[in-house]
Image (cartoon, rainbow, N blue to C red):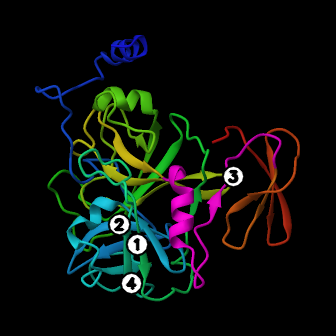
Amino acid sequence: HSAAGGWCLAWCLSPAAVFGQTGEVHRATQRHKGQPTMHVASAGSWPWQVSLQTTYHFCGGSLINSQWVLTAAHCLASFNGNPSRLTVYLGLQTIQGSNPNSVSRTVARIIVHASYNSETSDNDIALLQLSSAVTFTSYIKPVCLAAAGSTFYSNVSSWVTGWGNTASGVSLPSPGNLMEVQIPVVGNRQCNCNYGVGSITDNMMCAGLAAGGKDSCQGDSGGPMVSKQGGVWVQEGIVSYGFGCAQPNYPGVYTRVSQYQTWINSTSHNKHSNPGQFIKPIRNNVSYIRNPAGCIESLTSVSDYTAILILSKHLVTVERKTPF
């Protein structure tokens, strides 16, 4: 063992490091929100959230522009690149019953990341091209994406949304409202100790409570994990995998969106749609301007810990205590 590897292993062998009897971490094939403290989301509060359905809801996703949806690669394994059975629902509040603000689209293309590894869940990311563009409303809007170089520190408060199980094996009760749960980011070093050194790659990030009780769950896979940065909601993660639902010492594992800016832009850009809108990493001494999608771009230098946002032609100064 190298000195660095030995240090990491020693650091990990704490009460929080729980391994399977064979020395391997138990790994769920799909992300399972645990017995959790979760809440029904208000209609329109997460307007980028989408539901992927065949004859039923099976995964979530997020709208990143008028014609593209971001989701997890493992959600699409059974489709073999054929989108004919797949429908995307946008503006949805409940899985059952009437949804007056919802629209649906079939899928023109499924694009799974070429380096997706189903064994390790590395590069668990995919894009869906909708059959036609959607019109943005109060209930259907794209999310901003964390740009390359973004860092989300431990304990940054984040939100996960979806129509997944309320606990392992426990389906969401009728009418199947969109649910939300607030969880803190867990650093990759700690998360590697929970799941086994090397399990959590730089393409992943984790979130949850050491005590458990709050998590994503089966059926939430592919959905967004977001946090509010500089007054704008930014998607930093995609629900990927975990050990059970809301188990102590097993935070949820998410695909780290900021690692894929180049891939998302090159894949989703065509003459019919703009690529996803990325929030550049916020640094001190930088000001920002909102672009037409509502995301922030670097502009000029200003004083420490402030950012100037131009919102509907009005200048607003926002105090920024923690960069990301």
**The image quarter in which residue 238 lies:** bottom left
Of the two numbered discs 3 and 2 on the same chain, state the one appearing first in sequence: 2
SS class, disc 1: strand
92 or 303, nearer to the observer: 303
Sequence-first disc among 1 and 4: 1
Q: Are marks 4 and 3 in contact (CB under 8 Å)?
A: no
- Tell whether label 1 touches label 3 (CB within 8 Å): no
Amino acid bearing label 4? Ala
Which badge, 4 or 3, comes first in the chain's sequence? 4
Label 1–label 2 contact, CB within 8 A: yes
Q: Position of residue 247 (x, y in %)?
A: 25, 38
The residues bearing labels 3 and 2 have C-alpha atoms spaced at a distance of: 26 Å
The amino acid on which the numbered mark 2 sits, given as a three-letter code, is Gly
Residue at mark 4: 108
Q: Is residue 262 magenta?
A: yes
Name the residue at 57% across, 79% down.
270
What distance separates the C-alpha of mark 1 from that of mark 4? Answer: 16 Å
* Image coords of residue 164 (percent x, y): 27, 61
Q: Which residue is mark 1?
A: 50
Residue 2 position in % (x across, y down): 38, 13
